[in-house]
Amino acid sequence: MWEDPIIPKFHYGAHYSSAAIVLYYLVRLEPFTTQFVHLQGGKFDHAERLFHSIQKTFLSASKVTMSDVKELILEFSIFLNF
């Protein structure tokens, strides 16, 4: 219902973009580490927000919180079998 003549319509108001999500998953591999640090203003983000588990990331984006809007792929669902 929100109409704005300047801001175009969008699905989610989160900061995530395709490039940011790729950097999130590949933060431990160069050159992605350097690009991730650059995206974060020259330093690493808080440790609890850095990628550490496909399983926990999948659960967060699919069941735990509606504010986690990372794109999910079916192949990640295999990590739900614990």
Image: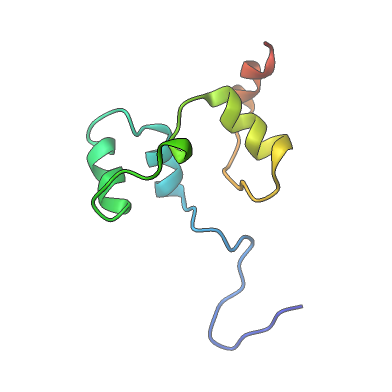
Identified at 45% across, 32% down, the residue is: 51
- In the rendered image, residue 13, in percent from the top left (x then y), is placed at 59, 63
Q: Quadrant of residue 76?
A: top right
The foreground one among 73 and 15 is: 15
The foreground one among 44 and 34 is: 44
How many numbered marks appear?
0
The foreground one among 43 and 28 is: 43
> Which residue sits furthest top?
82
> Which residue sits furthest right?
1
**Quarter of the image where the C terminus is located:** top right
Asked whether, in this view, residue 71 is left or right of residue 82, the answer is: left
- In the rendered image, residue 23, in percent from the top left (x then y), is placed at 37, 40
Rendered position, 52 above or below 41:
above
**Quarter of the image where the N terminus is located:** bottom right
Q: Quadrant of residue 12?
A: bottom right
Rendered position, 48 above or below 52:
below
Rendered position, 75 above or below 2:
above
Identified at 28% across, 56% down, the residue is: 41
Identified at 64% across, 36% down, the residue is: 60
- In the rendered image, residue 19, in percent from the top left (x then y), is placed at 40, 48
Rendered position, 76 above or below 66:
above
- In the rendered image, residue 8, in percent from the top left (x then y), is placed at 56, 76
Identified at 57% across, 44% down, the residue is: 70
Image color mode: rainbow
